[in-house]
Image (cartoon, rainbow, N blue to C red):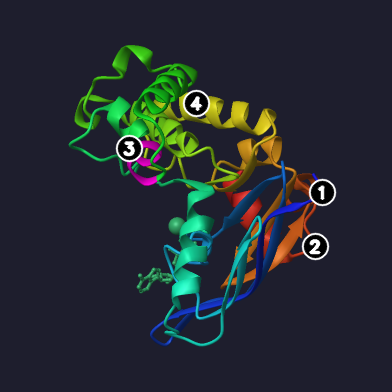
Amino acid sequence: MTEAAIRLSGIHKSFGAHHVLRGIDLQARNGEVISIIGGSGSGKSTLLRCVPLLEQPDSGQIAVGDDSISLGEPGQRLTGRDRQAMRRLRSQLGFVFQNFNLWPHMTALQNVMELPLHVQKRPRAECREEAEALLERVGLTARRDAWPSQLSGGQQQRVAIARALAVRPRALLFDEPTSALDPELVGEVLTVIRALAEEGRTMVLVTHEMGFARHVSHRAIYLHDGRIEEEGPPEQVFDNPLSERCRRFVSHHL
Ligand code: ADP
Ligand code: MG
């Protein structure tokens, strides 16, 4: 856990007059698991979406491994060099969304194979073999030819995790991966995420599952109004935060 896998500095983002991210500095070291907590509207999703530039910050720097982009002003047009960096940066990240976002017209196996095959342009046989192994990992070998609509929410989210892993990412980003699930399906998804944390994956996880976050993360961050208000080891942030607001937030959600 030495080298930084992800580095964000001075990230600002507004939507119209609404200043949503107000200067975020955040680094994830290789192998580090960081959880981000905070109230609804505090900017958690926007922050996570800025890392792969699904949302373009108005200013600040983003680096993933050796690829970096600097933004200087709102609405700045990306140069050709920026776009190349963005593609490389994005291809090093696996993203898992709240609502799974599987491609509905592809089977589970096709969903997992799509990016390695058509974006990374790796050999089909290799993509297929790896996708099958990933589906086995998330316990879905028997469902590999099912359409997303034939799968439960928990199964869809496990396919989405396999899909995120299929690009061989340097880091995984999870945005409330269990909050769209029926309560009885949450456990099967958390089990998969816990196993990934235990094998030393770099992960940034936005979640309302406080007990889980405290257990798996090396560091926790409490976001309020687009700023990092509390940051530290989970024992601090969840059990003994410096910020009174963080303390209230955590005690409501435990
Ligand atoms: P969180 O994930 O912590 O609930 P979000 O990052 O989704 O918060 O949103 C932070 C704020 O930014 C909210 O007030 C939300 O309405 C606003 N916001 C998010 N995305 C957009 C967008 N695409 N256009 C306009 N406002 C947005
Ligand atoms: Mg959100």
Label 2 sits on residue: 242
Q: Looking at the picture, tell me which residue is in the foreground, 116 or 98.
A: 116
Q: Position of residue 194 (x, y in %)?
A: 61, 29
Disc nearer the start of the sequence (1/4)? 1
Kindly indicate whether the residue at mark 4 contacts the one at mark 2 (C-beta within 8 angstroms).
Answer: no
Q: Residue at (48%, 50%) from the top-left corner? A: 91
For ligand 2, tell me if the residue under mark 4 lies within 8 Å: no
Q: Which is closer to the viewer, label 3 or label 1?
A: 3
Using a 10 Å C-alpha cutoff, classify the residue at mark 2 as few (fewer than 14 neighbours), some (14 to 19) or many (20 or more).
some
Q: Residue at (71%, 59%) from the top-left corner? A: 27
Report how far apart the C-alphas of labels 2 and 4 lie in the structure. Answer: 31 Å
Q: Would you say residue 25 is visible in this rendering?
A: yes
Using a 10 Å C-alpha cutoff, classify the residue at mark 3 as few (fewer than 14 neighbours), some (14 to 19) or many (20 or more).
many
Report how far apart the C-alphas of labels 3 and 4 lie in the structure. Answer: 27 Å
Report how far apart the C-alphas of labels 1 and 4 lie in the structure. Answer: 31 Å
Label 1 sits on residue: 2
Q: Residue furthest top?
A: 142
Q: Position of residue 87 (x, y in %)?
A: 46, 59
Could you tell me which secondary element the residue under label 2 belongs to? Answer: loop
Disc nearer the start of the sequence (2/3)? 3
Could you tell me which secondary element the residue under label 4 belongs to? Answer: helix
Kindly indicate whether the residue at mark 3 contacts the one at mark 2 (C-beta within 8 angstroms).
Answer: no
Report how far apart the C-alphas of labels 2 and 1 lie in the structure. Answer: 26 Å
Q: Which is closer to the viewer, label 2 or label 4?
A: 4
For ligand 1, tell me if the residue under mark 1 lies within 8 Å: no
Within the magenta stretch, is there residue 171?
Answer: no
Magenta stretch, overall SS? helix
Label 4 sits on residue: 187
For ligand 1, tell me if the residue under mark 2 lies within 8 Å: no
Badge 2 amino acid: Leu
